[in-house]
Amino acid sequence: MVRGMYTAASGALVAQSAVDTIANNLANVNTTGFKRAVLQVQAQPKTDLYRFQTDPGNNGNARTAGVPVQVAIGALGSGAQIYDTPADFAQGAIAATGNDLDVALSGPGFFAIRAGNNAVRYTRDGEFVRDQNGQLTAQNGDRVLNAAGNPIVLPTSGKIEIGRDGTISVAGQTYDKLGVVEFTNPVNLRPEGSSRFVDAGAGARTATNTTALQGSLEKSNADVVRSMVDLIANERWFDANQKSIQTQDDAVALAVQTVGRTS
């Protein structure tokens, strides 16, 4: 019974983590460039079960007759556990904004930016601004990088035009190019928050299959309807495991009270 309680408890913990993950996706349904997280679950290691029985000696070996032997019964599952919580990099909807400094990416690429701690991060959030020094930055001040990995500096005035290949022109003169990269193993891109990702072995390379769309932004790829359905399903899963724990706890309590009692 106690084993069953632990198994049900593991299921409840996974269900709670799933609810937290879905709730975070819902909270970012309007966050530009957000990529929803996916909870991956796996079975916990199984336990091999055996029984001991007396060898009747039917195998013709008189020395083993009546000696207890170990006989394999099979494997017993011990519940579920979280394997990983990767991001789903599916393309989000493209929304036109008309702002010259808004850039959406169509394809698997990411913008390269330099955070305040000088570390390079990657994002799909193309809601940029031009500061008083002409630097192209994200809304939080992170500097947007060019194809060479350097901050992009533009004239402080003049109409900006961004080509589909990321080339930036001001007042008709070409100045720089957005540093858009793609990844060989995007599963190794780890979310850091604020629609930022860290390259943890993803293998950055120059983008070849991504198009920059000026005057547009990519919306979050979190789907409200799907998230609500998943949220309800996981809450019911949690309730089922909770009831299983309670039922087994009641059974253990009854056994403790009655076993050994004489009539």
Image: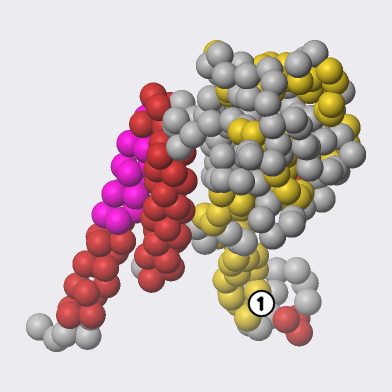
Picture quadrant where residue 151 is located:
top right
Which quadrant is home to the C terminus?
A: bottom left
The foreground one among 120 and 138 is: 138
The crowd level at tag 1 (other Cα within 10 Å; few <14, some 14-19, many 20+) is: few
Q: Residue 192 placed where, x, y %? A: 61, 51
Q: Is residue 238 left or right of residue 169?
A: left
**Residue 79 falls within the magenta-colored stretch:** no
Q: Say whether residue 87 is visible.
A: no
Name the magenta segment's main secondary structure: helix
Asked whether residue 100 appears in the rendered view, the answer is: yes
Locate the N terminus by quadrant: bottom left
For residue 129, above or below residue 94: below
Q: Mark 1 points at which residue?
A: 69
> What residue lies at 84% left-to-right and 43% top-to-bottom?
150
Give the total of numbered labels. 1
Disc 1 marks a residue whose amino acid type is: Val
Q: Give the range drawn in magenta.
A: 229-243
